[in-house]
Amino acid sequence: MSMMKIKFTFQKRVRLAQGLWLLSWAAMFSGMVVFFMGVFLKTELLRRSEVMHNDDIHVVPNLLMVVGLASVGINLCAGRICQDSMDVARFARWKTFLTPFFIGSLLFTFMFLVAMALSYALQASLEESLKIGLKNGIRFYKDTDTPGRCFQKQTIDHLQIEFQCCGNNNFRDWFEVQWINNRYLDFTCKDVKDRVRSNVDGRYLMDGVPFSCCNPASPRPCIQEHILDNTAHHNYDYQTEELNLYSRGCRQALVSYYMGLMNTIGPGVLSVFMVQMSMLASLRYLQTAMIGVEVEDMEVETEGYILEKGLKETLEEAKETLKALLRLKGGQVVDETTEGDAEAGASE
């Protein structure tokens, strides 16, 4: 028994084709929106690539761009099919092509859901990538004269100012690395020599942070050095001076930013998926409704359906077809092997 069967008169088929033509254009523009959302997300990820350890998260924008472009192509074809459905002679050339086209379009459409699911599933990977990338970025902050790391300081400073954050987890991350280049340290100064000798691996470590960690909302001038020393500054208590430096770590800030983007993109992609599925359902009705139409009798009443048989029967039939294809392929491999052995025996 056909699934979701509807009877179509000539007038209903015409209205279906006209409505489908408009829907295909709406779906095409929706696909373009998804493509540009993927481009935007890709650009934002590339902007922060220096503080990311791996590119796993790039699979989301890449997939969005692919399915967006595929949607544009699918809907352009669907629009042409709608136009040709008004002429039985022209529509005949689409009959053998429509079923594989419909199946392929359905697979691409479900990729919208895959992209949306990945945008949430890869949050842990994004966080781990930023954790390692930011740790390395802070470690190489001082290497302004090292090829490949010259712009690391600029990148970190811009990042901390733009996202109002400091360090990887918090400002204390700067206490664990030497972030001042040796060329700007006076090694004849007793304080510098004592600090280098007392620290691990001869590094110049201190309880200080770069200027980009300073919070302009602080009522007092920014304190960058001796942050943990209350006696070094007048009327100062580092445990209560929360406004002096940004308290949020850059990893948390970036994860919130990117997940905010993906949370915005997700519902948009879901909306496009619904529009695309509506277009494919309408196209399926048009395809099946046109099966019984002949050139001699254009106004004949026909039936349209989503599936020719019930869902269970269709799945069983697809399963048997797949098994037959696999058996056929396996038989060909066996025949080729047997033929090869026979040729080898003949040559001997």
Image (cartoon, grey):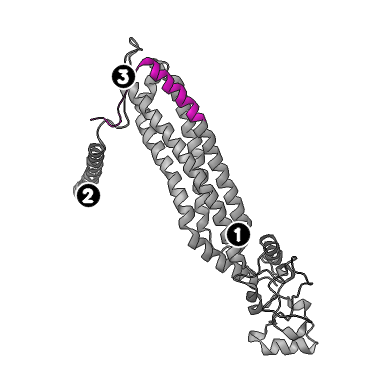
Q: Please name the amino acid that badge 2 sits on.
A: Ala
Q: Where residue 337 appears, x then y in whole percent? A: 23, 48
SS label for mark 3: strand
Residue 276 sits above or below residue 338 on the image: above
Which three-letter amino acid code belongs to the residue tagged 3?
Thr
- Tell me which residue sits at (21%, 49%) in the image: 341
Give the extent of the magenta segment. Answer: 1-25
330 vs 70, nearest the viewer: 70
Q: Is residue 300 above or below residue 169?
A: above
Residue at the disc numbered 1:
49
**Other-residue count near label 2 (Cα within 10 Å), few / some / many at <14 / 14–19 / ≥20:** few
Q: Quadrant of the image for the N terminus?
A: top left
| Residue drawn where x is 44% and y is 38% of the image | 274
Q: Quadrant of residue 173?
A: bottom right
Checking the image for residue 302, the label placed there is: 3
Gap between marks 2 and 1 measured at Cα = 57 Å
Name the secondary structure under disc 1: helix
Q: CA distance from mark 3 to mark 1?
A: 57 Å
- The x, y position of residue 168, in whole percent, is 61, 70
As drawn, is 106 to the left or to the right of 308? Answer: right
Secondary structure, mark 2, is helix
Q: Residue at label 2?
A: 344
Residue 277, picture quadrant: top left
- Magenta part mainly helix, strand or loop? helix
